[in-house]
Image (tube, rainbow, N blue to C red):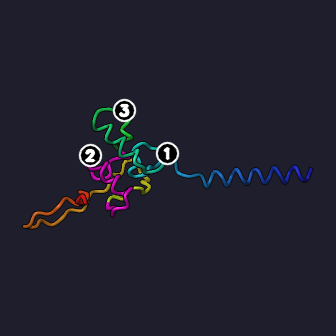
């Protein structure tokens, strides 16, 4: 009888611990910035989902793809897919891609504004040109 009570108490303790240590789900109170498909990680599939949505090959009835995939501004653009691809290629990330966003209403991180210069500058999101050999 004593062993049965000990096992029951241990199971109750494990149940309580699992309730307090459960991870935050993407459908709950937060999402991962750049995880357009909502699978819990930022992959090249997320960039593809954005491209399909922009090409009208995919629907976004609940706005989840737009909310999770918009990393460069509030509007979903091809620059978001490029930023995710750059993140995956380990280029410097200035948008917080891959970070957990707690509040579903938080606006995406805005890119810092650059001071105007007299000389033409390259787009900071443009990939570098590598000449063929």
Count residues near mark 3 (Cα–Cα under 10 Å), then give few for <14, some for 14-19, many for 20+: few
Q: Which residue is mark 3?
A: 61
Query: Taking 129 as reference, is 91 left or right?
Result: right
Picture quarter containing residue 113?
bottom left
Q: Which residue is mark 2?
A: 78
Of mark 1 and mark 3, the one earlier in the sequence is 1
Question: Of the numbered discs in the image, which one, if any, rests on residue 28?
Answer: 1
Are the residues tagged 2 and 3 within 8 Å (C-beta)?
no
Residue at (39% x, 52% y) in the render: 33
Task: Name the N-terminal-most of marks 2 and 1.
Answer: 1
Which residue is depicted at the point 10% across and 67% down? 117
Residue 42 placed where, x, y %?
Answer: 43, 51
10 Å neighbourhood of mark 2: few (<14), some, or many (≥20)?
some
| Residue at figure coordinates x 26%, y 50% from the top left | 79
Q: Is residue 118 above or below residue 70?
A: below
Locate residue 15, reporting x and y percent: 70, 50
The Cα–Cα distance between marks 1 and 3, rounded to whole angstroms, is 18 Å
Frontmost residue, 71 versus 132: 132
Q: In terms of secondary structure, where does tag 2 sit?
A: helix
Query: Are the residues at dot 2 and dot 1 in contact (C-beta closer than 8 Å)?
Result: no
Q: Nearer the viewer, mark 1 or mark 3?
A: 3
The CA span between labels 2 and 3 is 19 Å
């Amino acid at each position: 009888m004593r062993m049965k009570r000990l096992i029951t108490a241990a199971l109750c303790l494990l149940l309580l611990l699992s309730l307090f240590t459960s991870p935050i789900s993407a459908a709950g109170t937060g999402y991962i910035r750049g995880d357009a498909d909502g699978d819990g990680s930022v992959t090249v599939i997320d960039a593809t989902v954005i491209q399909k949505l922009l090409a009208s090959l995919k629907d976004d009835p609940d706005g989840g793809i737009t909310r999770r995939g918009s990393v460069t501004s509030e509007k979903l653009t091809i620059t978001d897919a490029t930023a995710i691809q750059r993140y995956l290629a380990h280029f410097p990330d200035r948008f917080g891609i891959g970070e957990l966003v707690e509040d579903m209403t938080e606006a995406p991180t805005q890119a810092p504004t650059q001071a105007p210069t007299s000389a033409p500058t390259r787009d900071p999101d443009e990939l570098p040109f590598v000449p063929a050999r």
